[in-house]
Image (cartoon, rainbow, N blue to C red):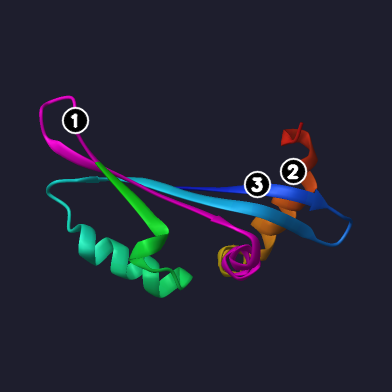
C-alpha cells in the first residue's frame, strides 16, 4: 500500500496537507472485503471513497488496483491518524529532512 500526502505548506511547528492518495494492489487470492473493512475502520473511510479497477497480472491472474483520493475537510483527520501512528524519533527525522525532498 502507498499513502501519498501532498503538502500545502510547512511552518516551523506544523505541516499542512492538501490531499491524500491511498493506492494498493489486491491479488485474486487475497480477501478484498477484509482488507477494505480494516481501512474503513482505521481511517474512517467508506467504499464510496475508493475506485477499483480490475486488470490482469503478468501471469494472467486477476489483480485489482484500488485508489482513494481525498481532499479538503477530510485530510486533517486522516493525516493526524497516520502521523500519530509514527514513533517520535521517525517524526523528528521526517520533519528535519522533509525540505530536502520538496520542490
Residue 98: which numbered mark, if any? 2
- Please provide the residue range marked out in magenta: 54-80
Q: Pointer 1: what residue?
A: 57
Q: Pointer 3: what residue?
A: 6
Rendering coords of residue 35 (x, y %): 28, 62
**In screen coordinates, is 58 left or right of 94?**
left
Q: Nearer the viewer, mark 1 or mark 2?
A: 1
Assign a secondary structure to mark 2: helix
Rendering coords of residue 90 (x, y %): 65, 55
Rendering coords of residue 74 (x, y %): 59, 67
Disc on the earlier residue, 1 or 2: 1
Few, some or many residues within 10 Å of mark 1 (<14, 14–19, 20+): few
The residues tagged by marks 2 and 3 sit, at their Cα atoms, a distance apart of 12 Å
- Magenta stretch contains residue 22: no
Dots 3 and 1: beta carbons under 8 Å? no
**In screen coordinates, is 92 left or right of 64?**
right
Name the residue rendered at 37%, 63% in the picture: 48
- Magenta stretch contains residue 67: yes
| The quarter of the displayed image where residue 60 is located | top left
**In screen coordinates, is 101 left or right of 79?**
right
Assign a secondary structure to mark 1: loop
Few, some or many residues within 10 Å of mark 2 (<14, 14–19, 20+): few
The residues tagged by marks 3 and 1 sit, at their Cα atoms, a distance apart of 29 Å
Pick whichever, 72 or 77, lies toward us. Answer: 72
Q: Nearer the viewer, mark 2 or mark 3?
A: 3
Name the residue rendered at 81%, 61% in the picture: 14
Assign a secondary structure to mark 3: strand
Name the residue rendered at 38%, 65% in the picture: 39
Disc on the earlier residue, 3 or 1: 3
The residues tagged by marks 1 and 2 sit, at their Cα atoms, a distance apart of 35 Å
Amino acid at each position: 500500500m502507498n499513502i501519498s500526502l501532498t503538502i500545502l505548506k510547512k511552518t516551523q511547528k506544523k505541516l499542512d496537507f492538501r490531499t491524500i492518495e491511498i493506492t494498493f494492489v489486491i491479488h485474486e487470492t487475497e480477501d478484498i472485503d477484509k482488507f477494505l473493512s480494516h481501512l474503513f475502520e482505521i481511517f474512517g473511510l467508506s467504499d464510496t471513497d475508493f475506485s477499483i479497477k480490475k486488470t490482469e497480472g503478468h501471469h494472467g491472474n486477476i489483480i485489482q488496483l484500488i485508489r482513494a483520493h481525498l481532499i479538503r475537510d477530510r485530510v486533517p483527520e486522516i493525516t493526524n491518524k497516520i502521523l500519530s501512528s509514527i514513533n517520535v524519533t521517525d517524526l523528528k527525522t521526517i520533519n528535519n529532512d522533509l525540505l530536502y525532498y520538496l520542490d
